[in-house]
Image (spheres, coloured by chain):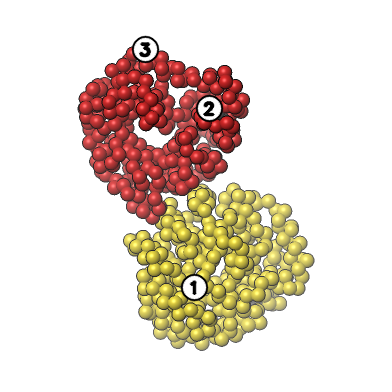
Chain colours: A yellow, B red
Amino acid sequence: MANILLTNKCVRACPYCFAGQEMAQASAFLSWENVVYLADFLLASAHSRVSLLGGEPTLHPQFTDILVYLLERGFTVTVFTSGIMSKTALTELAAHVAALPPERLNFVCNLNNPAQTDTLKSETHKLHDFLAALGPRTMPAFNIYRSDFDIGFIFELVARFAMKKRLRLGIAHPIPGAANEAITVADIGAVIERLCSFRAAFEQSRVRPSFDCGFPLCRITDAELGWLVRLTGRADFKCTPAIDITPDMQVYCCFPLSSLNRRSIYDFDSFNAVVAYYRSLQERIRGDIAGIYAECGACVHRAERTCAGGGVCQLVNRLTNENPARLRTIENEHQACLPQ
Amino acid sequence: MNTRLVCPNDAALIGRLARRALCVRVTAPQDIAAAAALARRHNSLVCVICETASLEDIEVSGDWQGIPIALAVARTGPFRRLAAKLKGLRALNLRVYLPCTTDALVGARLLASVGVPVCVTLDPAAAMDWEALADLMTYALLNIARHAPIEPFQTMADGWRPAERGEDWGRALFDDPERYLHVAASGAVALSARELAAGEFVGDVCELDSPRLKQRVDERKERWRELFLENHFCARCPSWRLCRGRFSAGKTEPDGCAEFFGEAAEIIERARAKSARSPTWQA
Ligand code: SF4
Ligand code: SF4
């Protein structure tokens, strides 16, 4: 799916932020001309699903207009938001999406636990206003950046605001060259253990956990896996390239890899060519390092593709720290590959 | 003369006309249906031209079915306020005319991309964002996805002859005296909307078929020769063939117009090459 970054601005300062490097640049907002170009480009490539991201996408001065436009063009839209927006913007947004079928538009709301992450009271109020207006369209999301994380507050929010009963869980990955708070490979076992300690809350609320990329299958016990599959019907341990398109029409694959083989969207004839280009970059990287653990190389789950061997960003981070010259070589070799 | 008359929705004036092809001007959208009915009583209706402030304020009416409408607005308004009207607009025989302001050019692209035909009014008297205009023309003729026509670029492309005098694309803007004459409520006739507004008349509706009026039109069509006699900068302009000095008035040197029309000719050539590579199947 294409992730369109409407702006690089955000009002929060999450300690784990993966988009920090983007946001450090001068304010940028996607122009209308580029919105139209991207809509045409994606539809011509037979892609009718988009995600709107930022920074905080709702900070784009024409956010509601762009959203309504993409819906008019036939897209199914997912908006990744903090839910923190002005009352006027929220009222306007809610009014324009009220009549839409739920499958056409949903929100993924990135929640921080105010007890563990600095959060202004006013932000919490705004978040609650957002959830009061759009809770039933909204899936909670949580980024794990410390191994003593607490997600208890999310179950309360889901019940209070009738949110979607699926919790998107992401591991905050280290950004190569940045100082974001993140989970190291060594911490992952503790993270999974901590997550499973919320089992009762998940079962009681019937909220299903859903894993973003980078979770390793082998650090989950058979009992935990059985519980997960019973509750959710499936459990994924994948890492697939998410294509991010910046307000100035550059593309890269995943925030943590934003400095790697960045190109202009105009270099490509179709969105499929963009996906193929970054998929082959990932394969190059995985050709050098099979996975986050030494066992990944010979692992049957990796061979059978039931586990990706962790997130490619974790592998890039390792290369950055251990063998930066090799990473540059991979990047240069790939840069020379013209998109098909 | 078989010219179309652009006239106000004035019962007395229209009463003086019969068996003419009329473009009737109104300023209130709610007058469109009545104006069309009045014009059709004794004349044929080319279209109703409705000039109003913003597209967002217009209530699309079911009475407009079957009426060709040129809806001239100063701006489109925010897209969120247009969305509910789009289905209605697309179902009509309607084209939205917009000025060449930066916002209106964006509005034109948005409307075309959602299937509403548009025309941007290239106005020599207004400041032009030539770069934005060239960008819109590229979108109009070379885009990767289908959209509604964007005038006057389509007419420019259709009439372009690289090695000879092409057709005047001004007709897409009602600005071609061979095709459109502009009539005041008094019956006075002008060769363009600009001259009508300035009170510069060349005759009266009672002379419509007279040789004198025809001569005035012919003179106007050949006025470009003066630029050559005066050795005006337009006479040396490489983009002359497409523009014909349309933007020459009041200028001492080209202000981006020459560059734009040069690029416009290239865009047209590229569009032709593209359609030649993928010709439409013919039975
Ligand atoms: S591929 Fe690596 S991370 Fe995945 S299950 Fe195998 S050893 Fe574990
Ligand atoms: S483009 Fe400018 S310089 Fe060239 S003919 Fe037109 S008005 Fe004259």
- Specify the label residue B211 is tagged with: 3
Amino acid on which the number 2 mark rests in the picture: Gly
Residue B167 vertical position relative to residue B89 in the rendered view, above or below: above
- Report the side of A59 relative to A183 (left or right): left
* Same-subunit check for callouts 2 and 3: yes
Q: Secondary structure at mark 1?
A: strand
**Comparing marks 3 and 1, which lies closer to the viewer?**
3
The amino acid pointed to by label 1 is Asn
- Label 2 within 8 A of ligand 2 by Cβ: yes
**Relative image position of residue B274 (x, y in whole percent):** 56, 36
Chain identifier of the residue bearing label 3 in the image: B
Q: Label 3 to label 1, Cα distance in Å?
A: 76 Å
Tell me which residue sits at (37%, 20%) in the image.
B202
Which secondary structure, mark 2? loop
The verdict on a common chain for dots 1 and 2 is no
Which quadrant of the render holds ligand 1? Answer: bottom right
* Crowd band around label 1 with a 10 angstrom C-alpha radius: few (<14), some (14–19), many (20+): some
Q: Find residue A58 and report its horizontal and vertical position in percent.
A: 47, 64
Q: Residue furthest top?
A: B211
Tell me which residue sits at (38%, 25%) in the image. B200
Q: Amino acid at mark 3?
A: Pro
Instruction: Compare residues A108 and A299 and report the one nearer the observer.
Output: A108
Q: Which residue is mark 2?
A: B245
Residue on which disc 1 sits: A110
Q: Give how far across and how far down residue B6 sits, in percent.
A: 33, 28
Please name the residue shown 41% across and 77% down the image. Answer: A125
B250 sits to left or right of B98: right
